[in-house]
Amino acid sequence: MTQPEGFEVPGKEDYVCKLKKSLYGLKQSPRQWYKRFDSYMLELGYSRSPYDCCVYHNKVEDGSMIYLVLYVDDMLIVARSKSDIQKLKGLLSAEFEMKDLGAAQKILGMEIYRDRSKKKLFLSQKSYIQKILSRFGMSSAKPLNTPNVSNVHLSSAYAPQSEAEKEYMSRVPYASAVGSLMYAMVCTRPDLAHVVSVVSRFMIQPGKEHWQAVKRIFRYLKGTPDVGISFGSDTEYIRDFRGRGFKSRWRFVDMT
């Protein structure tokens, strides 16, 4: 790395520092890596998305677009033509030490399934859901068909009142559990959007009733771990693996 500003060695300003730690061992490593990768992508003629600085895009010869999505040192490349993908892979491999894992099957806890004959893409978080169920002791819980109860309305009135309840709730991983549910909601489970937004309102002073509501969401996930999202045509009438029909652009499907 170049010598830090203000700490250059007199007479050796053209020298560089040899790192003795790995990429993940230094506080500034992620930033330095991103700056290095970003400068190379811009050098190749790619544009950085104004909405997400880790998304790059470029127009190829046939007029279509090629996209590269970066997450730390993992990346996904999307294009209409495989030859365009291979060309970009070659350029990246020549500049960085890389390992080609082939067609994406899993990224950030999301499993990717494809039905190329029907031009469908399915996303699921079955493994992630099973992991968080185990983490919060809900693997053996009885599954439920709905994530909330219509006649129960949570409010701040359920906040801990007695010292015993406060002591009990101090040992409950409420914030961690809600955060784990939020990740599933954002990625593949928009069916959790409302109920997760409700339980997230009580992060500061959650009570037993709030915790019971969170556990009910886990019990719902216990019964629906294979549910995910399908992306495809909005005009074609399609059926999922259970034979139920939908007409929307995205929908829930059972991966089993």
Image (spheres, grey):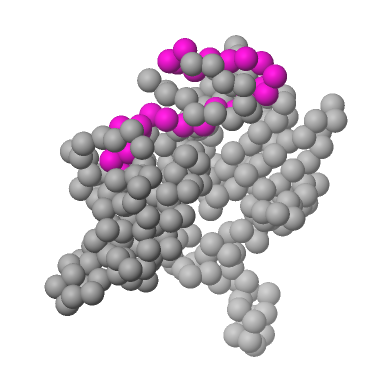
State how many labels appear: 0
Is 189 situated left or right of 35 in this image?
A: left
Is 222 situated left or right of 122 in this image?
A: left
Residue 157, located in which quarter of the rendered image? bottom left
Instruction: Name the residue at 61% across, 76% down.
Output: 3
The C terminus, quarter of image: top left
Instruction: Name the residue at 48% across, 47% down.
Output: 193
Please tell me whether residue 172 is drawn above or below residue 119 in the rendered image.
below
| Percent of width and height locating residue 153 | 37, 55
Q: Is residue 241 magenta?
A: yes
| Range of residues picked out in magenta | 218-243
Residue 148, located in which quarter of the rendered image? top left
Please tell me whether residue 93 is drawn above or below residue 28 in the rendered image.
above
Q: Is residue 235 magenta?
A: yes
Instruction: Name the residue at 55% across, 72% down.
Output: 17
The residue nearer to you, when weighing 229 against 70, is 229
Instruction: Name the residue at 60% across, 12% down.
Output: 117
Is 124 situated left or right of 159 in this image?
A: right
The residue nearer to you, when weighing 41 against 231, is 231
Looking at the image, the residue that sits furthest to the front is: 151
| Percent of width and height locating residue 191 | 47, 39
Q: Is residue 103 shown to the viewer in this render?
A: no
The N terminus, quarter of image: bottom right
Q: Is residue 193 shown to the viewer in this render?
A: yes
| Percent of width and height locating residue 202 | 38, 65
| Percent of width and height locating residue 26 | 46, 68
The residue nearer to you, when weighing 15 against 180, is 180
